[in-house]
Amino acid sequence: MPRGDAARPSVTDVARAAGVSVGTVSNVVNRPGKVSRATRERVQAAIDRLQFVPNGAARGLRTGTLAAIGLVVLDIRNPFFTEIARGVEDAAGDRGLSLMLASSDQDPTRERRILSLFAAHAVAGVVAVPASDDVFQLVELAGRGTPVVLLDHPSPVEQLPSVAVDNVAGGQLAVRHLLGGGAEQVVMLNGSHRLSQCRDRWEGARRAVRAAGLTPDSALTEVRVGSIDAAGGAAAIEEWLAFHDGCPPEALFCVNDLVAIGAAGALRNAGLDPADTPMVGYDNLELAAELAVPLTSVAQPTYEMGRSAAELLRQQAGADAAAPAGHLVFQPELVVRASSRPSRRLVPVGPPRL
């Protein structure tokens, strides 16, 4: 069972369980050569039974004497996560710490392996963009004494601090903008609802449609992409065009900028002008403004999110570690560019080809 802060085993608990002094436990952890083999084994058995983790990692986070913070993100190829990592790394560097960066590839099994690796290396703390809503292993890791902060994901449990963006509001901004430009039907290229980001942006899109007096089931269509990157966006549009006799969606809201870039490329490859399909992305990557048709995008304070997560991690390891966990929620902003101007196409989307 995961432990909360109140149940976290201490050196005293280990000493009591092993029938030795606190000093002996300290020697086993830090200077095992000074303790007999029999005593070491007895203390180690108590440590294993109680799942005790020496909080030298937490002390190192406060003083800057340990090596690294562990950061696991969904996909390190995505510039959004690169910028987040830079924020975490800069904040860690201020305290003499480096960064261990890994990608879960949105795979909970791979995420578990990464977290086990971080624990084995006694990282000073972990910042995680979880691959699903199941954060049991992160709660367990925190319960064993390693500070943990969720990033780009609201915390489903009170004891895990978190830094997130209001993605419901972001989805509303995007679709409200497209509807305000005259679109009557919006297609959202979205990822798996296992990810809170995808689920919340979809909910925001539905709220925007309802606020406009329209019915989500008729004015909004969700198309799931195989991967939330350019390849996934391109494949989704290619399939859409094949199924709709080459007619593109009236308007597109893409779950992130990479999906939007892939979608625009697929339209171009099909001989269509991406400028004729109003489109909004998400993340406001630097390259969004440099495209042939500059991309309208929902912006997140990416770097600040990373720094804030590292600061919450420091607080978890500090003297105020027993204080309630912090939960920061940033507000997104819409950055309007040429990609979302009203469509020049007059031909409505026809029925699907049977």
Image: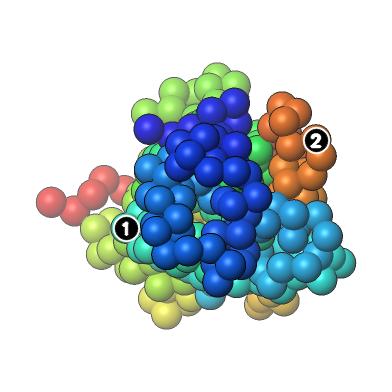
How many circles with numbers are drawn on the protein?
2
**Looking at this view, is 17 or 216 the one in front?**
17
**Looking at this view, is 112 or 182 the one in front?**
112
Query: Around disc 1, counting alpha carbons within 10 Å, would you say few (fewer than 14), some (14 to 19), or many (20 or more)?
Result: few
First in sequence: mark 1 or mark 2? 1
Query: Around disc 2, counting alpha carbons within 10 Å, would you say few (fewer than 14), some (14 to 19), or many (20 or more)?
Result: few
User: Judging from the image, what secondary structure is the residue with disc 1 in?
Assistant: helix
User: Judging from the image, what secondary structure is the residue with disc 2 in?
Assistant: loop
Q: Position of residue 206 (x, y in %)?
A: 50, 30
Residue 328 disc label: none
Q: Can residue 219 be seen in this view?
A: no
* Residue at image location 74% in from the left, 54% down from the top: 59
For disc 2, the marked residue is: 320
Q: Quadrant of residue 310?
A: bottom right
* Residue at image location 66% in from the left, 58% down from the top: 57
For disc 1, the marked residue is: 109
Q: Image check: 132 left or right of 338?
A: left
Outermost residue, left side: 354
Q: Distance between the residues labelled 1 and 2?
A: 33 Å
* Residue at image location 34% in from the left, 68% down from the top: 235
Give above or below for 206 relative to 317.
above
Instruction: Give the residue type at disc 2.
Output: Asp
Q: Where is residue 146 in the image (x, y as percent from the top left)?
A: 59, 50
Instruction: Give the residue type at disc 1.
Output: Thr
* Residue at image location 40% in from the left, 51% down from the top: 42
